[in-house]
Image (cartoon, rainbow, N blue to C red):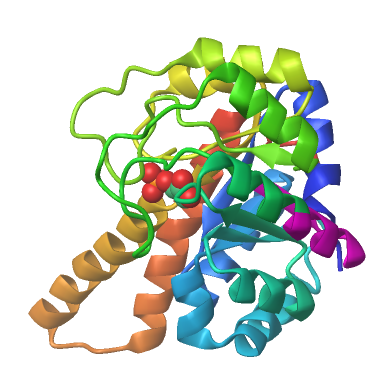
Amino acid sequence: MPVVSLKETLDRAFAERYGVPAINIVDDLSIQAVLAAAVEERSPVIIQTSVKTVKMYGRDQLYGIFTALARDVDVPVSLHLDHCPDRSVISSCLGGGWNSVLFDAHELDVAENLRQTTEVVQEARRYGANVEGEIEGIQGVEDDIGSDEASVQQSLEVAVDFIKRTGVDCFAPAIGNAHGQYTSAPVLDHQRVTDLVEATGVPMALHGGTGLSKEQFQDLIARGCAKVNISTALKEAYMKSALEFLRGAEEKGKWDPPSLFRHQTAAVTQMAREHMRLFGSSGRA
Ligand code: 13P
């Protein structure tokens, strides 16, 4: 099974300046659809799970589904836990096979966040796993975590100090990005990505990918956002394709679940493929 560390995947993407899609899956169908896209595009991919999805399935069941589906995939795949403020869930996922976690302690003050993130990095290293760090909340609620309040940006010095002292493998800066669909075109602080990358040499994670323009993606990836998070686009592809199919099923009076699943799988795979092409990860595996 080509499950590779997040660091290995991101280091190459960072050096060659393409973005690896980190896609929040919601179930087995969406894992399978995203992996199919990665194989068809010959792209590395990060399968990302929210805490909500981990709790919905149970850690071992979700990991079992992931390993069963990733077993025969011949492109690099990482399994990453998205925004997790809860140390016990972090420890549980690291112990249960996840090879990367985002310890989201932005609600703590930076000194305490730094102290605890350093511990999480040490814990992750014992499993050969990687850590994404965060000191500023990304605006918008992602699977019950976060808030709609605008993010409070820390100074460049504080962010650089956090990255260097914790030893995180990638960092999620708040640059005017937000989870969910944007209600107006976001104005992004792209210079901050350049400044953080120049000062640390660490790849950045771009959150709030859904709804950014082609130009914004390409610019931020060129500046060092090697991990690009997509969640809302998957939810929309998954549910809108179901809605469309079910409307047709009702009209015809024909109810065939496998046909519904095939329709949803095709929609999610297509969505993932489009992002892989956009991020330049196609053809890299
Ligand atoms: P979107 O829901 O805007 O795609 O953001 C995803 C994300 O950043 C997950 O952490």
Q: Where on the picture, by quarter, is residue 220?
A: top right
Q: Is residue 131 left or right of residue 135?
A: right
Residue 155 appears at what percent x and percent y? Answer: 52, 20
Q: Could you tell me which quadrant the C terminus lies in?
A: top right
Q: Where on the picture, by quarter, is residue 31?
A: bottom right
Q: Nearer the viewer, residue 84 or 281?
A: 84
- Look at 74% across and 80% down and name the residue there: 96
Asked if the stretch drawn in magenta spans residue 128, the answer is yes
Residue 206 appears at what percent x and percent y? Answer: 53, 34
Q: Is residue 56 left or right of residue 203?
A: left
Answer above or below: position of 219 versus 117. Answer: above
**Residue 76 shows up from this direction:** no
Number of marks in picture = 0
- Look at 78% across and 78% down and name the residue there: 95
Q: Is residue 194 left or right of residue 17?
A: left
- Look at 18% across and 79% down and name the residue there: 249
Asked if the stretch drawn in magenta spans residue 14, the answer is no
Residue 273 appears at what percent x and percent y? Answer: 55, 45
Q: Could you tell me which quadrant the N terminus lies in?
A: bottom right
Q: Nearer the viewer, residue 48 or 194?
A: 194
- Look at 79% across and 22% down and name the residue there: 201
Q: Where on the picture, by quarter, is residue 43?
A: top right
**Residue 23 shows up from this direction:** yes
The residue segment tinted magenta is 119-132
